[in-house]
Amino acid sequence: MSLNIHTFVLGMFQENCYLLVDDATKQAVVIDPGQDPDEVIAALAGLDVVGIWITHAHLDHIAGLQEVKAAAPHAKVLIHEVEKDWLTDPALNGSARYPEYIDPIDGPGADAVLQHGDTLMIGEHQLEVRFAPGHSPGHVVFVGDGFVLAGDTLFNNGIGRTDLPGGDMERLIKSIREQLYTLPEDTVVYSGHGPATTIGRERKSNWAVNDQGDLLSGGSNVQWT
Protein backbone atom coordinates (compact mmCIF):
# COMPACT_ATOMS: atom_id res chain seq x y z
CA MET A 1 0.00 0.00 0.00
CA SER A 2 1.13 3.53 -0.66
CA LEU A 3 1.89 6.54 1.47
CA ASN A 4 0.05 9.56 0.11
CA ILE A 5 1.45 13.05 0.59
CA HIS A 6 -1.03 15.95 0.48
CA THR A 7 0.16 19.57 0.36
CA PHE A 8 -1.65 22.55 1.88
CA VAL A 9 -0.39 26.10 1.37
CA LEU A 10 -1.35 27.98 4.50
CA GLY A 11 -1.71 31.51 5.78
CA MET A 12 0.01 34.79 5.05
CA PHE A 13 3.40 33.06 4.99
CA GLN A 14 2.31 30.65 2.22
CA GLU A 15 3.82 27.82 4.24
CA ASN A 16 3.59 24.24 3.01
CA CYS A 17 1.91 21.93 5.50
CA TYR A 18 1.93 18.25 4.58
CA LEU A 19 -0.50 15.48 5.46
CA LEU A 20 0.94 11.98 5.12
CA VAL A 21 -1.61 9.16 4.96
CA ASP A 22 -0.99 5.42 4.92
CA ASP A 23 -3.59 3.82 2.65
CA ALA A 24 -3.72 0.51 4.47
CA THR A 25 -4.16 1.66 8.06
CA LYS A 26 -5.44 5.23 7.56
CA GLN A 27 -2.77 6.35 9.98
CA ALA A 28 -1.75 9.93 9.29
CA VAL A 29 0.81 12.52 10.31
CA VAL A 30 0.68 16.30 9.92
CA ILE A 31 3.97 18.01 9.12
CA ASP A 32 4.38 21.69 10.12
CA PRO A 33 0.82 22.95 10.73
CA GLY A 34 0.92 26.58 9.65
CA GLN A 35 -1.45 29.51 10.00
CA ASP A 36 -5.20 29.03 9.37
CA PRO A 37 -5.20 25.21 9.10
CA ASP A 38 -8.95 24.76 8.58
CA GLU A 39 -8.55 22.79 5.35
CA VAL A 40 -5.99 20.53 6.97
CA ILE A 41 -8.31 19.83 9.88
CA ALA A 42 -11.16 19.05 7.48
CA ALA A 43 -8.93 16.51 5.72
CA LEU A 44 -8.34 14.64 8.99
CA ALA A 45 -11.88 13.25 9.07
CA GLY A 46 -11.79 9.45 9.18
CA LEU A 47 -8.04 9.29 9.74
CA ASP A 48 -6.07 8.01 12.71
CA VAL A 49 -3.76 10.97 13.26
CA VAL A 50 -0.80 9.59 15.20
CA GLY A 51 1.62 12.47 14.96
CA ILE A 52 2.29 16.15 14.38
CA TRP A 53 5.91 16.40 13.35
CA ILE A 54 7.73 19.72 13.29
CA THR A 55 10.78 20.37 11.10
CA HIS A 56 11.50 23.58 13.04
CA ALA A 57 9.64 25.96 15.32
CA HIS A 58 9.56 29.24 13.43
CA LEU A 59 6.13 30.83 13.73
CA ASP A 60 5.07 30.12 10.15
CA HIS A 61 5.51 26.37 10.68
CA ILE A 62 3.68 26.10 14.02
CA ALA A 63 1.01 28.83 13.88
CA GLY A 64 -1.73 26.21 13.48
CA LEU A 65 -0.33 23.70 15.94
CA GLN A 66 -2.82 24.42 18.70
CA GLU A 67 -5.80 24.03 16.37
CA VAL A 68 -4.54 20.82 14.80
CA LYS A 69 -3.67 19.33 18.18
CA ALA A 70 -7.18 20.17 19.41
CA ALA A 71 -8.64 18.38 16.39
CA ALA A 72 -6.35 15.37 16.88
CA PRO A 73 -5.66 15.25 20.64
CA HIS A 74 -3.99 11.84 20.55
CA ALA A 75 -1.42 12.89 17.95
CA LYS A 76 2.08 13.16 19.41
CA VAL A 77 3.86 16.47 18.82
CA LEU A 78 7.49 15.73 17.93
CA ILE A 79 10.31 18.25 17.48
CA HIS A 80 14.08 18.22 17.89
CA GLU A 81 15.16 18.67 21.49
CA VAL A 82 17.06 21.89 20.64
CA GLU A 83 13.79 23.68 19.78
CA LYS A 84 11.28 22.06 22.12
CA ASP A 85 11.10 25.21 24.26
CA TRP A 86 10.32 27.30 21.19
CA LEU A 87 6.84 25.77 20.99
CA THR A 88 5.80 27.55 24.17
CA ASP A 89 7.87 30.74 23.98
CA PRO A 90 6.66 33.50 21.61
CA ALA A 91 10.01 35.26 21.85
CA LEU A 92 11.86 32.18 20.60
CA ASN A 93 9.43 31.16 17.86
CA GLY A 94 9.13 34.73 16.58
CA SER A 95 5.41 35.24 17.02
CA ALA A 96 5.99 37.96 19.63
CA ARG A 97 7.49 40.14 16.90
CA TYR A 98 4.31 40.23 14.79
CA PRO A 99 1.35 40.95 17.13
CA GLU A 100 -0.50 42.73 14.33
CA TYR A 101 -0.52 39.56 12.21
CA ILE A 102 -0.61 36.63 14.58
CA ASP A 103 -1.48 35.75 18.16
CA PRO A 104 1.45 34.77 20.37
CA ILE A 105 2.23 31.07 20.01
CA ASP A 106 2.67 29.58 23.46
CA GLY A 107 1.74 25.93 23.13
CA PRO A 108 1.02 23.10 23.09
CA GLY A 109 4.41 21.71 24.00
CA ALA A 110 6.22 18.66 22.70
CA ASP A 111 5.08 15.16 23.62
CA ALA A 112 8.53 13.79 22.78
CA VAL A 113 11.79 15.04 21.30
CA LEU A 114 13.63 13.94 18.18
CA GLN A 115 17.28 13.15 17.61
CA HIS A 116 19.32 12.48 14.50
CA GLY A 117 18.87 8.90 13.33
CA ASP A 118 15.48 8.31 14.93
CA THR A 119 13.07 6.11 12.99
CA LEU A 120 9.41 7.11 12.79
CA MET A 121 6.53 5.02 11.46
CA ILE A 122 3.28 5.75 9.64
CA GLY A 123 1.56 2.41 9.29
CA GLU A 124 4.21 0.21 7.64
CA HIS A 125 6.13 3.17 6.23
CA GLN A 126 9.41 4.14 7.82
CA LEU A 127 10.90 7.64 7.91
CA GLU A 128 14.35 8.64 9.13
CA VAL A 129 15.01 11.80 11.12
CA ARG A 130 18.10 13.73 10.03
CA PHE A 131 19.42 16.71 11.98
CA ALA A 132 19.94 19.57 9.51
CA PRO A 133 20.58 22.84 11.38
CA GLY A 134 21.46 26.17 9.82
CA HIS A 135 18.14 27.79 8.99
CA SER A 136 17.39 27.28 12.67
CA PRO A 137 19.44 25.53 15.35
CA GLY A 138 17.14 22.55 15.80
CA HIS A 139 15.98 21.93 12.24
CA VAL A 140 15.34 18.36 11.13
CA VAL A 141 14.25 16.75 7.89
CA PHE A 142 12.22 13.57 7.46
CA VAL A 143 13.47 11.08 4.87
CA GLY A 144 11.08 8.52 3.43
CA ASP A 145 11.12 6.10 0.51
CA GLY A 146 11.90 8.35 -2.45
CA PHE A 147 11.18 11.67 -0.76
CA VAL A 148 12.37 14.09 1.90
CA LEU A 149 10.31 16.60 3.87
CA ALA A 150 12.95 19.31 3.92
CA GLY A 151 11.33 22.18 5.82
CA ASP A 152 13.26 25.38 5.18
CA THR A 153 16.65 23.85 4.39
CA LEU A 154 16.42 23.41 0.61
CA PHE A 155 13.98 24.93 -1.88
CA ASN A 156 13.37 24.74 -5.61
CA ASN A 157 16.40 26.82 -6.69
CA GLY A 158 16.96 28.26 -3.23
CA ILE A 159 17.97 27.63 0.35
CA GLY A 160 16.68 28.73 3.74
CA ARG A 161 17.46 32.16 5.13
CA THR A 162 19.97 32.39 7.95
CA ASP A 163 19.45 35.97 9.17
CA LEU A 164 16.99 34.96 11.90
CA PRO A 165 18.13 34.23 15.48
CA GLY A 166 20.11 30.99 15.57
CA GLY A 167 20.68 30.94 11.81
CA ASP A 168 24.08 29.92 10.46
CA MET A 169 24.88 29.85 6.73
CA GLU A 170 27.93 27.62 7.06
CA ARG A 171 25.95 25.06 9.06
CA LEU A 172 23.06 25.20 6.58
CA ILE A 173 25.30 24.48 3.61
CA LYS A 174 26.96 21.64 5.52
CA SER A 175 23.51 20.22 6.34
CA ILE A 176 22.39 20.41 2.72
CA ARG A 177 25.53 18.71 1.47
CA GLU A 178 25.69 16.00 4.14
CA GLN A 179 22.03 15.28 4.89
CA LEU A 180 20.24 16.09 1.60
CA TYR A 181 22.68 15.90 -1.30
CA THR A 182 23.72 12.41 -0.16
CA LEU A 183 20.21 11.16 -1.03
CA PRO A 184 19.51 9.58 -4.46
CA GLU A 185 19.13 12.12 -7.26
CA ASP A 186 15.51 11.17 -7.95
CA THR A 187 14.49 11.87 -4.33
CA VAL A 188 11.55 14.30 -4.32
CA VAL A 189 12.11 17.33 -2.09
CA TYR A 190 9.00 18.67 -0.37
CA SER A 191 10.02 22.07 0.96
CA GLY A 192 8.51 24.39 3.53
CA HIS A 193 7.60 26.94 0.85
CA GLY A 194 7.19 26.79 -2.91
CA PRO A 195 7.01 23.89 -5.36
CA ALA A 196 8.57 20.46 -5.00
CA THR A 197 11.88 19.64 -6.66
CA THR A 198 14.40 16.79 -6.71
CA ILE A 199 17.83 16.31 -5.21
CA GLY A 200 19.34 15.85 -8.66
CA ARG A 201 17.91 19.09 -9.97
CA GLU A 202 19.18 21.09 -7.01
CA ARG A 203 22.63 19.52 -7.07
CA LYS A 204 22.88 20.51 -10.72
CA SER A 205 21.38 24.00 -10.75
CA ASN A 206 20.58 25.39 -7.28
CA TRP A 207 21.95 28.94 -7.33
CA ALA A 208 23.38 28.72 -3.80
CA VAL A 209 24.61 25.14 -3.35
CA ASN A 210 25.43 22.94 -6.34
CA ASP A 211 27.99 20.41 -7.53
CA GLN A 212 30.31 23.18 -8.73
CA GLY A 213 30.45 25.01 -5.42
CA ASP A 214 28.44 27.12 -3.04
CA LEU A 215 28.00 30.73 -2.07
CA LEU A 216 30.69 30.47 0.59
CA SER A 217 33.36 28.88 -1.59
CA GLY A 218 32.53 30.98 -4.64
CA GLY A 219 32.00 28.05 -7.00
CA SER A 220 31.84 28.85 -10.71
CA ASN A 221 28.07 28.44 -10.96
CA VAL A 222 27.25 30.51 -7.89
CA GLN A 223 26.01 34.07 -8.06
CA TRP A 224 23.68 36.30 -6.09
CA THR A 225 20.39 37.00 -7.79
Image (cartoon, rainbow, N blue to C red):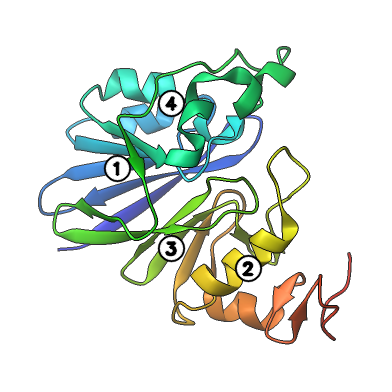
Which residue is pictured at 41% across the width and 19% down the height?
Answer: 66
Lower sequence index among marks 3 and 2: 3
- How busy is the neighbourhood of tag 4: few (under 14 within 10 Å), some, or many (20 plus)? many
**Residue 4 percent location from the top left of the image:** 29, 56
Which residue is pictured at 75% across the width and 82% down the height?
Answer: 213
Quarter in which the C terminus is drawn: bottom right
Residue located farthest toward the right when viewing the structure as drawn: 224
- Describe the element under mark 3 as helix, strand or loop: strand
Q: Which amino acid, by three-letter code, is at mark 1? A: Val
Residue 148 marker: 3
Residue located farthest toward the left when viewing the structure as drawn: 25
Residue 174 marker: 2
Measure how far apart labels 3 and 4 are at the Cα level: 21 Å
Measure how far apart labels 1 and 3 are at the Cα level: 14 Å
Lower sequence index among marks 3 and 4: 4
Residue named by callout 4 = 65
- How busy is the neighbourhood of tag 3: few (under 14 within 10 Å), some, or many (20 plus)? many
Q: Which amino acid, by three-letter code, is at mark 2? A: Lys
**Residue 54 percent location from the top left of the image:** 44, 40
Residue named by callout 1 = 29
Measure how far apart labels 4 and 2 are at the Cα level: 29 Å
Which residue is pictured at 54% across the width and 73% down the height?
Answer: 178
- Describe the element under mark 2 as helix, strand or loop: helix
Q: Which amino acid, by three-letter code, is at mark 3? A: Val
- Describe the element under mark 4 as helix, strand or loop: helix
**Residue 51 percent location from the top left of the image:** 28, 38
- How busy is the neighbourhood of tag 1: few (under 14 within 10 Å), some, or many (20 plus)? many
**Residue 206 percent location from the top left of the image:** 70, 73
* 1 and 3 marks in contact (CB < 8 Å): no
Judge depth for marks 4 and 2 and give the one in front. Answer: 2
116 to 147, vertically: above or below: above
* 4 and 2 marks in contact (CB < 8 Å): no
